[in-house]
Amino acid sequence: MLKKTLLCAALLVTAASAVAESLPAYPFIHVTGNSYQQLMPDIAAVDFEIVATDADPAVAKSTVEARINEVRALMQQLSLDPDDLVVREIRQSEPKASQPASGGPVYEVRCDVHINVRNVSNWPALAGGLLGKANLDGFASSFDLSNMEQVNDQLVTEAVNDARRRAGVMAAADGRRLGPMMAATPQDLKNLTTSMGLERGDFRFQRNASNARPGETDRDTFVMVQTLKLRQPVDVIFRIEGAAPVKRTK
């Protein structure tokens, strides 16, 4: 019994030491800052499949190639760079679900297509033109910013400023001065938040992406340029100093 008691005590001391080591040795404030922007994208991309079935695999392949040529013609009509079209390997299979009860096999030929849209003003015409073509399926659209790196930097700066403002309010409420920023991360400080009981759900940097199929999505919705809603959190630790100076009134 004595050995068990000593073992439990040792484990408690070890756990307490681990928590203590994860906390700064100086007085501090741990705060989360956030920034948010809603912007219109200037670039986009679309992915889809071209699928054809036939008892003759050569006919199915010919249909797929014809659709690829139609997509190229649409891009040329919109003055899009042909190099922005990527056609991945053409695949042939005999899907069990498509096989008839009797007779010869049915072959399925498909390929994946990706198109970069460097000027989002071309998006409605391109998306609308693709939706009107046969044998095209599994549409997925995404929107982005060509200067996303600069926008990311701005979001981080704004989030840190928000954290500093929040920490300043907390320090002043206790009659303290806010010291320098000692640590910062765009993700949760998991060890610190866990040890202090401040565990939160994960935040994610969000970009717009949508999936659509001609039979499932309204045409007007798919051809619409989607607004980007961007959010960036930061976890920050500030040192807090002694009592704030008292403002003297005249």
Image (cartoon, grey):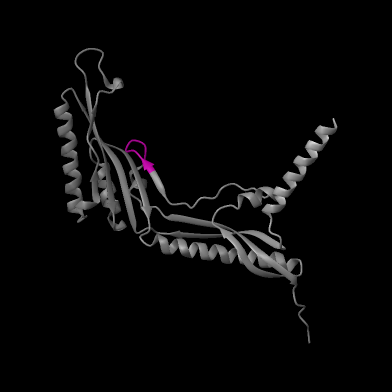
Q: Can residue 197 be seen in this view?
A: no
Q: Where is residue 141 in the image (x, y as percent from the top left)?
A: 35, 46
241 relative to 116 in the view: left or right: right
Magenta-colored span: 211-217
Q: Residue 214 lies in magenta, yes or no? A: yes
Residue at the limit of the structure toward the top, as seen here: 102
| 96, above or below 38, in the image | above
Q: Position of residue 181 (x, y in %)?
A: 62, 66
Residue at point 69%, 55% (across, down): 23
**Which quadrant of the rendered structure holds the N terminus?**
top right
Q: Position of residue 104 (x, y in %)?
A: 19, 16
Residue at the limit of the structure toward the bottom, as seen here: 250
| 94, above or below 16, in the image | above
Circle count: 0
Q: Is residue 40 visible?
A: yes
Front-most of 42 and 193? 193
- Main secondary structure of the magenta stretch: loop
Residue at point 32%, 50% (across, down): 45
User: In the rendered image, which quarter is residue 47 located in?
Assistant: top left
**Which quadrant of the rendered structure holds the C terminus?**
bottom right
Residue at point 21%, 18% (across, down): 105
Residue at the limit of the structure toward the front, as seen here: 3
Residue at point 37%, 46% (across, down): 221
236 relative to 206 in the view: left or right: right
145 relative to 91 in the view: left or right: right
Q: Residue 38 lies in magenta, yes or no? A: no
Q: Where is residue 132 in the image (x, y as percent from the top left)?
A: 25, 41
